[in-house]
Image (cartoon, rainbow, N blue to C red):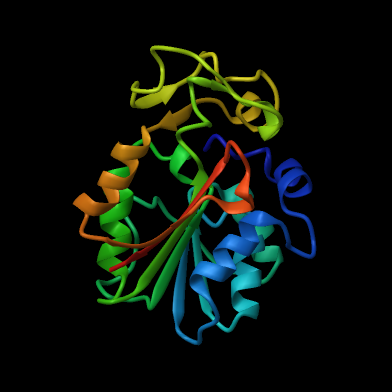
């Protein structure tokens, strides 16, 4: 059983409105664009983004470790496979593009996930990653629901890895339900992609907030 099992129905209601809109989808769709090739959604969850990417013309395959989340994805008609992102069940160079949305704070071995994603992408393929901004979201930062001004705590930002109790844990919401998060400072996060052989093509902090909570990246295989 994974940490997200038993929470899929709540997650869909809380985070996946229909029709899909908002800054996350705006960033993903802008950075990826329309296409007609094969696309891998790494950590597809309940499948809302996979469906929307399909509407852009992509032939989407989603992977996730949570069977409960995949239950919702399959109900949406997503071609969804239960698999660990660190051991993807696909041949080398199988996909024309990949996305991973709000996943890097759930992955303990990001290097393995990135290496596997790169392996299954064809040369020149885009990889769009959108998730928490590590400068303002993490163990060091009280930034509840990304409102107001984050309160930063000394001694926490450089602590890479898993964290449970920390100043940045609000005690409610997603993490209160699913448990620990994983944090990498911004430099280490970007370097992890570079070390796996990805080339950074674009970086955005959507919504033009004074203190962004989201980081959007487009890499190239």
- Labels in figure, total: 0
The image quadrant of residue 80 is bottom right
Horizontal relation, residue 192 to residue 177: left or right: left
Q: Residue 191: image x %, image y %?
A: 26, 45
Residue drawn at point x = 62 percent, y = 55 percent: 24
Vertical position of residue 131 compared to residue 159: above or below: below
Residue drawn at point x = 34 percent, y = 22 percent: 158
Vertical position of residue 25 compared to residue 194: above or below: below
The image quadrant of residue 55 is bottom right
Residue drawn at point x = 54 percent, y = 14 percent: 167
Q: Residue 86: image x %, image y %?
A: 32, 50
Res 103 visible: yes
Q: Residue 196: image x %, image y %?
A: 22, 54
Q: Residue 108: image x %, image y %?
A: 37, 35
In front here: 32 or 162?
Answer: 32
The image quadrant of residue 199 is bottom left
Res 109 visible: no
């Amino acid at each position: 059983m994974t940490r997200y099992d038993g929470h899929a129905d709540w997650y869909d209601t809380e985070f996946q409105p229909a029709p899909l809109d908002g800054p996350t989808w705006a960033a993903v769709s802008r950075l990826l664009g329309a296409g007609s090739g094969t696309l891998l959604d790494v950590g597809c969850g309940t499948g809302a983004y996979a469906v929307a990417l399909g509407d852009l013309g992509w032939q989407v395959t989603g992977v996730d470790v949570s069977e409960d989340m995949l239950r919702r994805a399959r109900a949406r008609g997503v071609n969804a496979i239960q698999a660990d992102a660190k051991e993807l069940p696909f041949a080398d160079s199988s996909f024309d593009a990949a996305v991973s949305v709000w996943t890097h704070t759930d992955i303990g071995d990001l290097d393995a996930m990135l290496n596997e994603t790169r392996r299954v992408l064809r040369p020149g393929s885009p990889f769009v990653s959108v998730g928490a901004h590590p400068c303002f979201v993490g163990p060091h930062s009280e930034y509840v629901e990304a409102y107001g001004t984050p309160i930063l705590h000394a001694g926490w930002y450089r602590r890479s890895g898993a964290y449970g109790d920390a100043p940045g844990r609000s005690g409610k919401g997603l993490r209160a339900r699913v448990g620990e998060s994983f944090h990498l400072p911004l430099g280490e996060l970007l370097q992890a992609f570079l070390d796996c052989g990805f080339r950074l093509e674009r970086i955005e902090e959507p919504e033009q907030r004074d203190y962004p909570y989201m980081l959007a990246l487009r890499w190239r295989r």
